[in-house]
């Protein structure tokens, strides 16, 4: 084989391999080309990734499925005559990865709408305005004074706040540390969300964590020894999220949210 024929053979082989790789990638990818309701219905169901919490979705001891956002997305699917599949995922980064990889169609949880997340996600209309608060045990419990009680943000200096691994609250605590000009230590716990850690705070296993006020208020009704008075951040919009390509699905969700 002379040089010219060999070169042509290499070019043809390269093009063929590239074409095969493209076809395989299209077959393997789970990200749909079309995310409208009709296409989702044809594919079987709306795939929802939702966090395991009192705001999200929980299964009670009686076997009942409950949760504020679970009820909302279930009603949306009922109105759309759309089957629904749920996946529990408390880690927001994992939920975003599932969405981008085509493992689900919508993230149903109160996600803070930030400029960085807007770059990768398409947010629905906001569901709530929420702010982050410090969760700690009350100053006096059964006439016993809690010596670790924090009255203001400055008193968090040299204290340790326990948070879920990869929690968005980590960024806020790091920023707060800079704002007060002192160190706030962060203890991260894998395989737990901040709500579960707040329950552990109530039991005395940790001193402090951070929750959204909406979830903290709900949790305090059951764990009455918790104090949630100290604000850690400003009020933010919180929404559900879909892929950037899921414009029609987002429009349908927005119409539903506006009428709730």
Image (cartoon, rainbow, N blue to C red):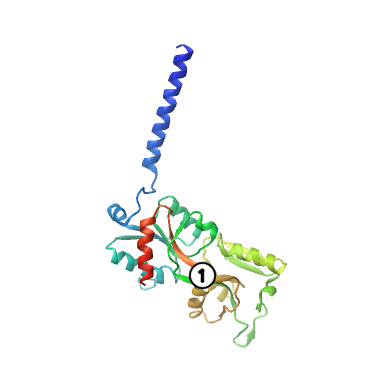
Question: Where the N terminus falls, by quadrant?
Answer: top left
Outermost residue to the top: 2
User: In front: 137, or 33?
Assistant: 33
Residue 99 picture quarter: bottom left
User: In front: 60, or 55?
Assistant: 55
Q: Residues within 10 Å of mark 1 (few under 14, many from 20)?
A: many
Residue at (43% x, 19% y) in the render: 9
Residue at (40% x, 72% y) in the render: 68
Q: Is residue 242 left or right of residue 147?
A: left
Q: Position of residue 51 (x, y in %)?
A: 45, 64
User: In front: 91, or 5?
Assistant: 5
Residue at (33% x, 55% y) in the render: 36
- Note whether 38 is above or below 209 in the view shown: above
- Note whether 223 is above or below 180 in the view shown: below
Residue 204 picture quarter: bottom right
Q: Secondary structure at mark 1?
A: helix
Q: Position of residue 6 (x, y in %)?
A: 46, 16
Q: Is residue 220 left or right of residue 184?
A: left
Q: Is residue 143 left or right of residue 121?
A: right
User: In front: 39, or 70?
Assistant: 39
- In the rendered image, which residue does mark 1 sit on? 195
Q: Position of residue 156 (x, y in %)?
A: 67, 72
Q: Position of residue 211 (x, y in %)?
A: 54, 71
Outermost residue to the bottom: 143
How many numbered markers are drawn? Answer: 1
- Note whether 249 is above or below 57 in the view shown: above
Question: Where the C terminus falls, by quadrant?
Answer: bottom left
Outermost residue to the right: 181
Residue at (48% x, 67% y) in the render: 238
């Amino acid at each position: 084989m002379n040089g010219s024929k060999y070169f042509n053979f290499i070019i043809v082989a390269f093009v063929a391999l590239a074409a095969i790789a493209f076809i395989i990638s299209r077959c393997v990818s789970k990200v749909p080309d079309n995310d409208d309701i009709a296409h989702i219905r044809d594919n079987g169901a709306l795939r929802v990734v939702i966090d395991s919490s009192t705001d999200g979705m929980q299964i009670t001891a009686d076997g009942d499925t409950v949760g504020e956002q679970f009820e909302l997305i279930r009603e949306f699917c009922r109105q759309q005559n759309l089957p629904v599949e749920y996946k529990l995922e408390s880690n927001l980064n994992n939920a975003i990865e599932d969405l981008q990889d085509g493992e689900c169609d919508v993230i149903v949880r109160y996600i803070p709408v930030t400029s960085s997340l807007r770059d990768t996600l398409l947010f629905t209309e906001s569901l709530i305005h929420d702010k982050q608060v410090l969760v700690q045990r009350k100053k006096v419990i059964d006439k016993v004074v809690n010596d670790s009680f924090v009255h203001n943000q400055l008193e968090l200096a040299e204290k340790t706040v326990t948070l879920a691994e990869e929690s968005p609250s980590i960024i806020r605590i790091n920023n707060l540390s800079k704002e007060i000009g002192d160190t706030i230590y962060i203890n991260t716990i894998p395989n737990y969300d901040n709500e579960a850690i707040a329950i552990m705070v109530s039991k005395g296993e940790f001193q402090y964590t951070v929750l959204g006020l909406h979830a903290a208020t709900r949790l305090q009704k059951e764990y009455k020894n918790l104090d949630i008075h100290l604000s850690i951040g400003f009020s933010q919009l919180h929404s559900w999220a879909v892929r950037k390509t899921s414009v029609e699905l987002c429009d349908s969700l927005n119409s539903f949210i506006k009428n709730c």
